[in-house]
Each structure stands twice: as structure tokens, then as C-alpha cells.
Amino acid sequence: MFFPLLMLFACKNDGCGDLGGITYSNITSLTGSIVSFEDNSYSSYDTLEDKAEVPFYSFGLRLSPVAEYYSLRKEAPKGSWLSAAYACSPLPPQPTEDIADIAVFSNADYTQGSSSKVIAAGDTLNSIFEIYDYASGRIVGLPDFLIDEQMKASYQGFALRLSVAVAAIQQHQFIVHYHLTNGEFYTYQASAVTLIP
């Protein structure tokens, strides 16, 4: 009696191996944490607990898209029992989805120390945040980052850091909206934090 040999394709050594096709990603959510960066470093930080107190200049949000990855190969001939797609958990070398917008909000008014200007709760705080994109290594103001076209939604994620001091001790709970050009929308709500001028 003849039994067909079933070949399994598995991920190995942080790669999908050669499945004969291109690897694709699909972002499914956004995850993150509130952190205190050391000095001007984005790679050295401490994760903060809920309601932690932190100087505004070291406070930041570390965010990463969560994605599923697939490796596709040529479609099997009609009548074949082989599937054309294989799930794969390791990360691909290049992201495949584009960022349409990132917006930061707070549940409280943000009174700026330098000008006493108040950004009302619920209004975008993009103008007072800078972004560090881990994939490209760029550090720019968030509005400047968003001017670029076809920004890839890298699995390496990004960090947001305040660039404008608070006028006095203030408690905030930041919310990040993350839009992709394909219409997908994800949010991240940070734990409460007390910012110190």
C-alpha cells in the first residue's frame, strides 16, 4: 500500500527558511509601555509602574506593532493537497504595511512650562512629542516624521518622548492612535504617569 509523504515546513533559526516565496506581514494590534529613558539614550530605559513619578525629559512611550507573518509560495496545481500559504512566526526582514498617522492624546490638559500654553485634554499632543524610529534610527519631531510618504510600520516599533516641559507637576494618561494606510486602526492606552518639570 502506498502512503504519500507529508512534508512540513517549519520556521527555524529566526527565519522562515526557503519556502519559495515572499514573506508578508499583517499587523493585528499595538502594544507598549511607559518608560524612563536614561540621558539621551533610547536603548537604555526603565519600565515604569502605574502612577509613577518621572521628570518630563526622561518620560517616554515605547510602542510596537504586533503582527502575524506568512510566507507564500507558488500556488499548487489544481487537485493538489498542498496548501499555498504557511504560517510563520519569526519576523521578516522588511515591513510591508504603511503608517498613515500616529496621534497622541491625554486625558488631562497639558500646560507647557516654556509658554504657559495649554493643550486641552483630547487635543492632539503631536507638537510636543519627538519620535525615535528603531528601524531607521531617525529622531525627529512627530509632525515632521508624519510628513514622509510610505512610512513602513516596522515590527521594531518606535518610541515617543516629550520635548516640551510641563509647567507644574501634572498627572497624565496618554493614548496613542495608530492608523495604517489600509484602513486598520489601533490604539494604545498607557498607564497613568505623574510628570515633573
Image: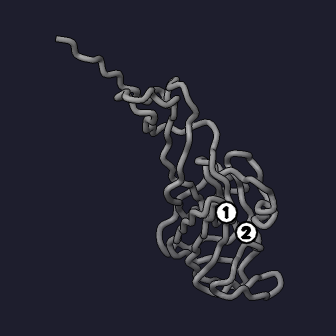
Label 1 is placed on what type of residue? Answer: Leu
Camera-side residue: 176 or 116? 176
Q: Quadrant of the C terminus?
A: bottom right
Camera-side residue: 58 or 110? 110
Precedes in sequence: disc 1 or disc 2: 2
Residue 80 x, y percent position in the rendering: 37, 27
Q: Quadrant of the N terminus?
A: top left
Residue 90 x, y percent position in the rendering: 49, 37
Residue 36 appears in the figure: no
For disc 2, the neighbor class at 10 Å (few under 14, some 14 to 19, many from 20) is some
Q: Is residue 32 left or right of residue 160?
A: left
Q: Is residue 176 left or right of residue 138?
A: left
Furthest-top residue in this view? 1
Residue 3 x, y percent position in the rendering: 22, 16
In this rendering, the answer to whether 158 lies above or below 9 is below
Query: In terms of image quadrants, where is residue 180?
Result: bottom right
Local SS, label 1: strand
**Real-space Cα distance between discs 1 and 2?**
6 Å
Furthest-left residue in this view? 1
Label 2 is placed on what type of residue? Answer: Phe
For disc 1, the neighbor class at 10 Å (few under 14, some 14 to 19, many from 20) is many
Residue 19 x, y percent position in the rendering: 50, 26
Query: In terms of image quadrants, where is residue 79?
Result: top left
Residue at (67, 66) in percent of width and height: 102
Disc 1 to disc 2: CB gap under 8 Å? yes
Residue at (82, 81) in percent of width and height: 114
Instruction: Identify the mark at residue 129; answer none if there is no mark.
Output: 2
Report which residue position mark 1 lands on: 160
Instruction: Identify the mark at residue 181; answer none if there is no mark.
Output: none
In this rendering, the answer to whether 106 lies above or below 95 is below
Residue 123 appears in the figure: yes
